[in-house]
Amino acid sequence: MGVRPLDLLDLDGLLTDDERDVRAQARRVADDHIRPDVAEWYDSGDAPIRELALELGKAGLLGMHLTGYGCAGTSSVSLGLACMELEAADSGIRSLVSVQGSLTMYAIWRYGSDEQKQQWLPGMAAGRLLGCFGLAEPDHGSDPTGMSTRARRDGDDWILDGVKTWILNAPIADVAVIWARAEKGVTGFAVPTDITGFQVREINHKMSLRASSTGEIVLDGLRVPESTRLPGVRSLMAPLSCLTEARLSIIWGVLGAARDCLDTALDYAAAREQFGRPIASFQLTQAKLADMAVELQKGFLLALHLGRLRDAGDKPLRPEQVSVGKLNNVRESLKIARECRTILGGNGIRREFPVMRHASNLESVLTYEGTSEIHQLSIGQKLTGLNAFAR
Ligand code: FAD
């Protein structure tokens, strides 16, 4: 048995004991509660998300980087390492954790009133309550500045009109953070989903992220009280800041999927013989393995750098810094998954191996939270001073 890819540079030595403990905890949850059944959930498109959320909550992995309200208050690097372990099992489950902690809980934690925080955060940290984050719309995905969902004041209430689509967890959420345009600019609401008139249509038959639940939220004159409005929101910068925060968990998470593919390919290449010897002994296979190991380690160093930057400051990272990480790590992880698939030959497309499932999941991750093209444009704008995606 050779050295595992991330051991080549002794990268573990860059982590603290606390960070390694959090990683071990997340790995236990993945090994005990996700890995044994995830292929089956993927096949059926039906994961037991509520039960999983309780396990994730018990392990302190939901909203873990937030402070107070039952949240663990860990570093951002610890959150990233946990996401890496969860995504090594499946991107859908890591997405559940990111939507819950880094998008929905973060929005309420940063922009909500104390009553809203008390109402939602402890239950969400424990995994008893699930949240979703409604920003994307059928006609406005990459370009949220065009948002057409409207919030209109009516006495003590607000009336919401619009459609939010591709919303992870929407069919099973207890609270939906909804972003809408009001007279004075974009505002946000933490809407209990049991409120009269709240409608969700499940998006079925996805070919990717099948161990997750996704839906479309239809707001047809939905009346919500003023107490649901997030008082700290002033503009579109609020949902964008949540995305910047959540992208860190993606930058780390995808490395888990890539690592799992590479580990699988290494084991397979050592065992599989063609032309009378293991395919791992062929130079072309070794070149693939070496290139992938190099990219995996570069991705890890990039994630660690961004995580340490985030932990050193009291503000979110700058958007273009996060764009560097999301663009590189998702793109390279997807390339690794595809390359590992070739090493497994025909077996690469079987359910018994996780490689095709990871590759297929990473196609979604490439698109959500800013497509690769949008992150290229964000970096390009910083480099040139010219905004290529302005209307
Ligand atoms: P479009 O915006 O229509 O883009 C299509 C293509 O055009 C892309 O390649 C894009 O890069 C390219 N493009 C667009 N504009 C430009 C430009 N100016 N220059 C160059 N190329 C451009 N949203 C939420 O709010 N909450 C969620 O929980 C959530 N979960 C999701 C889960 C999944 C599985 C998926 C697939 C999506 C999810 N989304 C969610 C929505 C996601 O954020 C959007 O799909 C994403 O922003 C892209 O929008 P779009 O699909 O409308 O594609």
Image (cartoon, rainbow, N blue to C red):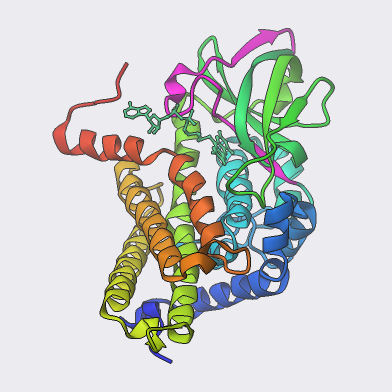
In the foreground, 301 or 104: 301
**Would residue 78 be seen by someone viewing this image from the given angle?**
no
Q: Where is residue 289 in the image (x, y as percent from the top left)?
A: 33, 74
Q: In which quarter of the image is residue 374?
A: top left
In the foreground, 222 or 185: 222
Q: Which residue is drawn at 38% across and 77% down?
A: 6
Q: Which residue lies furthest to the left in this view?
A: 384
Whether residue 144 is in magenta: the answer is yes
Judged left or right of residue 245, residue 172 is right
Q: Give the range drawn in magenta.
A: 130-156
Q: Position of residue 82 (x, y in %)?
A: 55, 66
Q: Quadrant of residue 192?
A: top right
Whether residue 283 is in magenta: the answer is no
Q: Where is residue 113 in the image (x, y as percent from the top left)?
A: 65, 35
Q: Residue at x 29, y 36 (%)?
A: 378
Q: How many discs mark residues in the rendered view?
A: 0
Q: Quadrant of the N terminus?
A: bottom left
Q: Which residue lies furthest to the bottom in this view?
A: 1
Judged left or right of residue 317, residue 135 is right
Q: In which quarter of the image is residue 178?
A: top right
* Vertical order, 262 against 382 (above or below): below
Q: Position of residue 166 (x, y in %)?
A: 60, 33
Q: Which residue is drawn at 32% across and 75% down?
A: 285
Q: Quadrant of the C terminus?
A: top left
**Would residue 110 be seen by someone viewing this image from the given angle?**
yes
* Vertical order, 351 against 214 (above or below): below
